[in-house]
Image: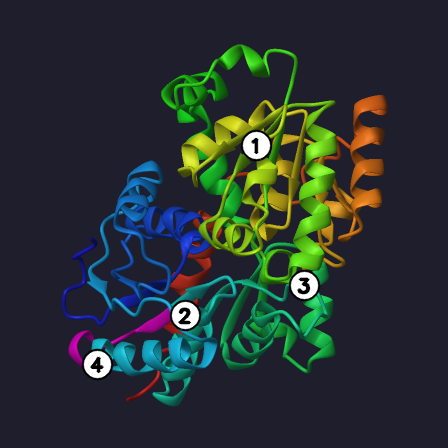
Amino acid sequence: MNTEAAGQAPILCVVGARPNYMKMAPIIRAFAAHDPALRCLLVHTGQHYDSAMNDRLFADLDLPAPDVNLGVGSASHAVQTAEVMRRFEPVIDEHGARAVLVVGDVNSTLACALVAAKRNIPVIHVEAGLRSYDRRMPEEINRVLTDQLADLLYTTERSAHDNLAREGIDPARAVFVGNVMIDSLFASLPRAVPAEALLRGAGLDPQVLAGGYGVVTLHRPSNVDRAEVVGPLVEALREIARRLPLVLALHPRTRNNLERFGLLGRLDAPGMIVLPPQGYLEMLGLMSRAVMVLTDSGGIQEETTALGVPCLTIRENTERPITVEQGTNTLVGIDPQALMAGVDDILRHGGKRGRAPELWDGRAAGRIAAHLAGWLDQHERPR
């Protein structure tokens, strides 16, 4: 990690869960490349932690090993948020903090922002201003509160500025820089693992994908925690797989729930290829050549737009409206009939191809580093 300006406190860069890694990796590289380099310390809260998967993702993204790992682990939202706060504050005591930079909308994002704000340390929020306007989503609560705490808010799309203005946030605090997720995608795409190689590695015949395939990810509690919701979705996927092979990277939460509801065996169906959770390069390889992607993931809505691959989002709303307005994304809700109608439209007409949104050009992290360096010089706070 960056060791220049040894006399100056570091920027504490916080990651807590898998989506954060893709956002933080290009930022860390941009800080190192800036002249002079921006000293930073990478803090992993361990909010979601699987040793093998974490090591693999860090390697895939060329992300340095964390300087600090808080090892919080899974718990209820309240307990997890509190435990991150409790363990993060001593990191500030030990290392100091020129600023705390958080990304996205996980519990660690809000927890560390809250600790920093109470310590009078500047809070920098990357991917600010996104709103689904669905307060039932824990991520929405994290987004809204983190933005209220943040001193500097970097946005991925211009509509985010309207959201922030409606919430009374000074427009001068928000800066449109583009999407760091797309920085990671463009940097990693040349190393993506081809779908055929992935299937061969899993002991499967890659020829099953020769005529085209779809990719499926499902993990949101609202979709997979209730049998009356996930059951009909599984039946819809079985029906779709008869027309187009589906590669399903099965999230542990989803697997556990399907097993609990007695539905796991329903995935053993013609055209259904069920795999364990995949690394970043494997998922890029799968998505980049897919006919379509069916998902409830926020990040995948963005990645499919950047890849030009039609995406059907199995949710009633999205905090990334630009992927619908300009990209390849279509919201289909959780109605199985609407999902199958969306699939039918793509198979008949090719689906949305969209266009790359403004500043989704692979250089967002460099803009953040350049702006933040000047901002910090002007806004250093007395302790």
Q: Which residue is mark 1?
A: 268
In the image, taking residue 11 as reference, residue 281 lies left or right, namely: right
The image shows residue 241 at horizontal and vertical percentages of 68, 28
Q: Secondary structure at mark 3?
A: helix
Label 4 packing within 10 angstroms: few (<14), some (14-19), many (20+): few
Label 1 packing within 10 angstroms: few (<14), some (14-19), many (20+): few
Q: Secondary structure at mark 2?
A: helix
Residue at 51% over, 39% down:
362
Q: Which residue is mark 4?
A: 90
Tags 2 and 4 touching, CB below 8 Å: no
Give the Cα separation between the discs numbered 2 and 4.
15 Å
Give the Cα separation between the discs numbered 1 and 2.
36 Å
Q: Secondary structure at mark 4?
A: helix
Q: Secondary structure at mark 1?
A: loop
Tags 4 and 1 touching, CB below 8 Å: no
Give the Cα separation between the discs numbered 1 and 3.
42 Å
Q: Which residue is mark 2?
A: 108
Give the mark, 2 or 3, whose residue is nearer the N terminus: 2
Vertical arrangement, residue 313 with respect to residue 292, above or below: below
- Mark 1 is on which residue type? Asp
Q: Which residue is mark 3?
A: 160
Label 3 packing within 10 angstroms: few (<14), some (14-19), many (20+): many
Residue at 65% over, 73% down:
171
Tags 1 and 3 touching, CB below 8 Å: no
